[in-house]
Amino acid sequence: MDGLPSGYRPNVGVCLINSDNLVFVASRLNVPGAWQMPQDSTYLQGGIEDGEEPKSAAIRELMEETGIVSAEIVAEVPNWLTYDFPPAVKAKVNRLWGGEWHGQAQKWFLMRLTKDESEINLASGEADPEFAEWKWASPEEVIEQAVDYKRPTYEEVMRTFRPYLNENGIAAKCKSSKW
């Protein structure tokens, strides 16, 4: 994979937007209060499979994590974005994955939902569920509610995709009893 930084596990992320240009985020089952966009999990094998192109991996990840198959790719971050694991996370994932990873290198894709949200199913049966609930959020909320070590990556993703996003968006819909 061109430009992949050494020592970083390759994976993908999806910034999914709806017709209001709000961003899909979901709260992690294993990290209460942490909201994230669909991406390869830090704690699961996942990643880009051997011989798989990042674009195909993004489509697969979106389907596995959310049940969504009706989405089109709008844009792509041109380079790999990296983040380093905090020490405790690094120790755990290196044990799980076997190896010595500094963090993850991600290819990010902006995708637009092309049908209605009834397709969203966090327990689609394709993979073990990672998320408890989901909502549509403004780009600012996405950044604010990300875990600290992923926040700079999320800032760069939002900066790159800003021309496609509703900057004054207000999260109008949430699928949770907690909000």
Image (cartoon, rainbow, N blue to C red):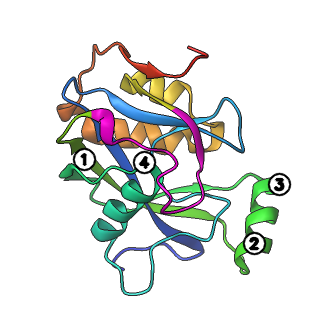
Compared to residue 165, the image places residue 98 above or below, namely below
Circles 3 and 4 in contact, beta carbons < 8 Å: no
Residue at 18%, 33% (x, y): give it: 163
Q: Which of marks 4 and 2 is in front?
A: 4
Circles 4 and 2 in contact, beta carbons < 8 Å: no
Give left or right: position of 127 versus 30: left
The residue where tag 1 is placed is 111
Q: Residue 96 carries which label?
A: 2
Element type where label 3 sits in the image? helix
Q: How many labels does the image show?
A: 4
Residue 113 found in image quarter: top left
Of marks 3 and 2, which one's residue comes earlier in the chain?
Answer: 3
Of marks 1 and 2, which one's residue comes earlier in the chain?
Answer: 2
Of marks 4 and 2, which one's residue comes earlier in the chain?
Answer: 4
Of all residues, the one furthest to the bottom in this rendering is 51
Compared to residue 20, the image places residue 101 above or below, namely below
Provide the major secondary structure of the magenta segment. Answer: loop
Compared to residue 143, the image places residue 51 above or below, namely below
The kind of residue on which mark 2 rests is: Leu
Q: Where is residue 82 in the image (x, y as percent from the top left)?
A: 51, 58
User: Distance between the Cα atoms at labels 4 and 2?
Assistant: 24 Å
